[in-house]
Amino acid sequence: MKTLKITAFALALSTAAVPAFAETITFAFSDDDPNYIATMEKLVDQFEAENKDITVNFVTAGYAQMMEQLPLQLSVGKGPDVAKITATDLLRYTADLRPYMKDPDGFAKLHGKSLELIRTPGTAPDKIGGYVASQTLNQPFVNVTLFEQAGVPLPAKGATLTEIVDASVKVAKATGVEIPFTMDRSGHRFAGPAFSYGAHFLKDGQLIFPDDAAKRYIADLYKWSQSGAFPKEMWGAAGGTRYKNMGDEFANGNVVTYLAGNWMVNPFIAKIGDAFDWTAIDPPCGDAGCVPMPGSTFVVAFQHTKAPEAAARLIEYLGSEKVQREIAEQFLILTGAQIDNPHYKTDSANAKSSMEAFARNVANVPEEARTIERTQGASAVYGSIVQRMSQLIVGELTLEEAYAQLAADAKGANVELAKYAAAAK
C-alpha cells in the first residue's frame, strides 16, 4: 500500500506509483480523528495482505480540501475509486457493487435499511454503492468544569438555544473564557437549531430557504455574533463555503459550549484527557421541538472506477461485521451496520455521559430532517448558509441582503437540479 498524506489531492491521485502486477485502486479518506485515520490505514494493510492481487493507494487529505476538489473530479469522471464522503450530492456518482461482491445478500442483511441512504432516485432498489460508515447527531458539548466554577447549572433538557447561549455567556464572564458559544463553520451544523425554530428547507419538492422561522434564527445568531456570545472570528475568519472545525478550541478549554456531534467524542477523550470534565447535552429546543440534526458518512465506490471488482472487495472487507464492530467499539461510532451489543472501549465518564445523551435523542429526529439529508442540492444550500452567514457576520451583508442572497441561492440550486434531472432522462 502506498499512503499519501497530501496538500495537493488531485495531483496525488494522478502521480502515485504502484506495482505493475497488481490491480490498483485509490481510497481517499478524511476524518477529524487522526487515530481513526491511522486505524483505517492499518485495515487497508490487512486487506492487502489477504488480497495480494490488489494494491490500494490510501490517500488522506483535510475534509475541506477533499470536499472542494472531489465534486469537480467526479463531475468529469475522475478522482478516487473509493472515498469516504458526507455530501449526498455525490451519491449520484456511486457504482453498483452488487454484481462484483462475494456475498451481496449477506452484506445487505448486515447493513439493513442504512443502504437506502446511499441509493438515489432511479437506481436499482437493491443497489449496493458502499456502506454507511457512521450515523451522526448534532448536539452541544459543554465544559462541565467551567459551569461548576461559575456556579451556573448546566442547561437542562428542554432548554432553548437562547437559554443555552445566555448560560454560556454567564459562564464565560465568570471564568474569563473567550468564547461562550460556537459551532463548526458548517451549514449542516447550522441546520439542527433551524429545525428547532420551525424552519423548513423543502416545499413541494423544491429547496426553500430562508422562511420566517429561519430568519428569526439567523437574526439571533447575528445578534450573538455582534455581542460576542458567538464571536465573529468563529465563522468570519474563513472565506466562501469552506468548512472549519472548532473542536480544538473546545478541547483547549477556550469554549464554554460547542455545537458539534457524536463523532467528536473519541477525539475529545485523547485531546482533553483529564484537563476538564465535559459532556454532550440534549439538543436546543424551539417552537418545532428539540432537533438533533442527523447525518451520515459513507464509504462508497464510484462509477468511473476501472476496477469495480477490486473496489467491491475492499468495500466488502471494510464493511464486514468484524471490521465494523472493531471500529464501532474503538471509536464510539454509531455504524450503519447492525452491530449487536457493542462494547465501547472507554473508561471515560465524560465519553459515556455524552454517548448516553446522543443515544436518548436518536428517536427525536423528525422525518423532514432525514429527508433533507437525502435531498440532492442540500449541500448547495448548506454551502450558501456558510457563505452568506459569514458575509453577514463580518458586515458585508445586512440581514435583509443576507435573506435575499440565501433565497436566490436556493432558487439557483433548484435550477441546477432541474438541469441535472433533464440530462439524466
Image: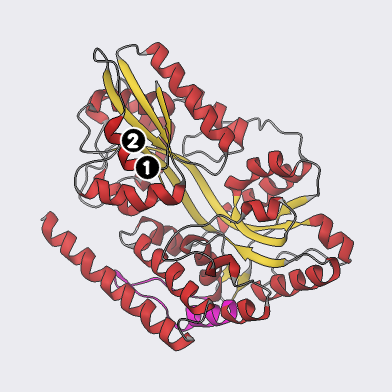
Front in this rendered view, residue 127 or 54? 54
Q: Determine if residue 219 is in view.
A: yes
Q: Residues within 10 Å of mark 2 (few under 14, many from 20)?
A: some
Q: Where residue 417 sits: x, y (%)? A: 23, 64
Q: Is residue 36 left or right of residue 378?
A: right
Region in magenta: 198-221
Give the residue displayed 69% in from the left and 38% down from the top. Answer: 270
Left/right placement of residue 205 relative to residue 354 reads: left
Whether residue 339 is visible, yes or no, is no
Quadrant the C terminus occupies: bottom left
**Image position of 82 (left or right of 350):** left
Q: Is residue 209 magenta?
A: yes
| Whole-percent x, y for residue 2 in the image | 39, 23
Residue type of the residue flagged with mark 1: Ala
What whole-number distance in Å separates the C-alpha atoms at marks 2 and 1?
A: 6 Å
- Disc 2 to disc 1: CB gap under 8 Å: yes
Check residue 284 for magenta coloring.
no
Q: Tell me which residue sits at (19%, 29%) in the image.
A: 306
Considering only vertical position in the picture, is 83 above or below 306? below
Q: Position of residue 188 (x, y in %)?
A: 48, 61
343 and 309: which is toward the camera: 309
Which mark, by number, is residue 134? none
Q: Quadrant of the N terminus?
A: top left
* Residue at 39 percent of width and 47 percent of height: 66
Residue 410: name its quadrant: bottom left
Q: Position of residue 102 (x, y in %)?
A: 30, 20
Question: Which element carries disc 1, helix, strand or loop?
Answer: loop
Q: Is residue 216 above or below residue 148?
A: below
Q: Secondary structure at mark 2?
A: helix
Neighbor class of circle 1 (other Cα within 10 Å; few <14, some 14-19, many 20+) is few
What residue is pinned by disc 2?
A: 12
Which mark is drawn over residue 8?
Answer: 1
